Image (cartoon, grey):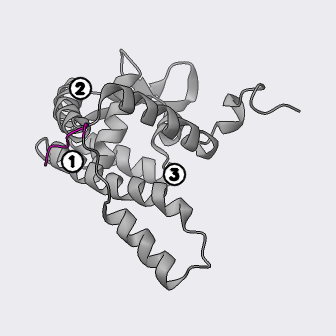
Amino acid sequence: MAAIDPQHPVEHDEVDRIVQAWQRVAPQLPVEPLHVLSRISRFARHLDRARKEAFSRHHLEVWEFDVMSALRRAGAPYELSPGILVQQTLSTSGTMTNRIDRLERRGLVERHRDPSDRRGVKVRLTATGCEVVDSALHDLLEREHDLLAHLPQAERTHLADSLRLLLAPLEPDADHRRSDKRHPD
């Protein structure tokens, strides 16, 4: 990855060229969103590539890491209900059942009855699963640090805050997080 000198910012990038081309061939179109969203999309592709590389070293698919990391973040005993896993990984219940089955066959998770609900099931990360997800997270964080290395900390903080504002209304529980100050009645 090429180093960027913060004292000499990039003046034009591929997105600028794309936007200029659209403005030239279709000047009536409001292409302003492309300035932000095309950059997010392009960066997401680089991030996806970095995630796949990090996880492949541990023989994991991205979705496997997502499920296992949700369990790991839950804290000991590293277990959640399938419904909570669906919410945290933005998947469907049918997809989650298939994913749990596959992870269970690999010995990375196990199912057991929920002691507080006789009809319920909990999914628990195994010791092997915990080792694998921790190691994969370490590799992922190295790659993510590399992706952000040329961005000064103040800019990272500003970007994180701006992206949080952009993403908040799109998240499933957005109605519960709205501030009364920003949305007066």
Q: Nearer the viewer, mark 1 or mark 3?
A: 1
Residue 45 seen from this side = yes
In this view, the mark in front (2 or 1): 1
Q: Amino acid at mark 1?
A: Ala
Q: Is residue 185 left or right of residue 160?
A: right
Magenta region includes residue 6: yes
Find residue 130 and name its label.
2
Q: Provide residue 174's location: percent of width, then percent of height.
A: 66, 37
Say what secondary structure mark 3 lies in: loop
Q: What is the crowding at mark 2: few (fewer than 14 residues within 10 Å), some, or many (at least 20)?
A: some
Q: Earlier in the sequence, mark 3 or mark 2?
A: 3
Disc 1/disc 3 C-alpha distance (Å): 25 Å
Residue where numbered disc 3 is placed: 92
Q: Position of residue 44 (x, y in %)?
A: 35, 52
C-beta proximity under 8 Å, tags 3 and 2: no
How would you classify the magenta stretch by its main secondary structure? loop
* Residue topped by disc 1: 50
Residue 111 is at least partly visible in this image? no
Q: What residue is rendered at 30% in x and 34% in y?
A: 109
Vertical order, 62 against 18 (above or below): above
Per the image, label 2 sits on a secondary structure element best described as: helix
Amino acid beneath label 2: Cys
Q: Residue at x 23, y 41 (%)?
A: 147
Q: Amino acid at mark 3?
A: Thr
Q: Quadrant of the C terminus?
A: top right
Quarter of the figure with residue 149: top left
The magenta stretch is 1-7
Q: Which mark is residue 8?
A: none
Near-viewer residue (184 or 103)? 184
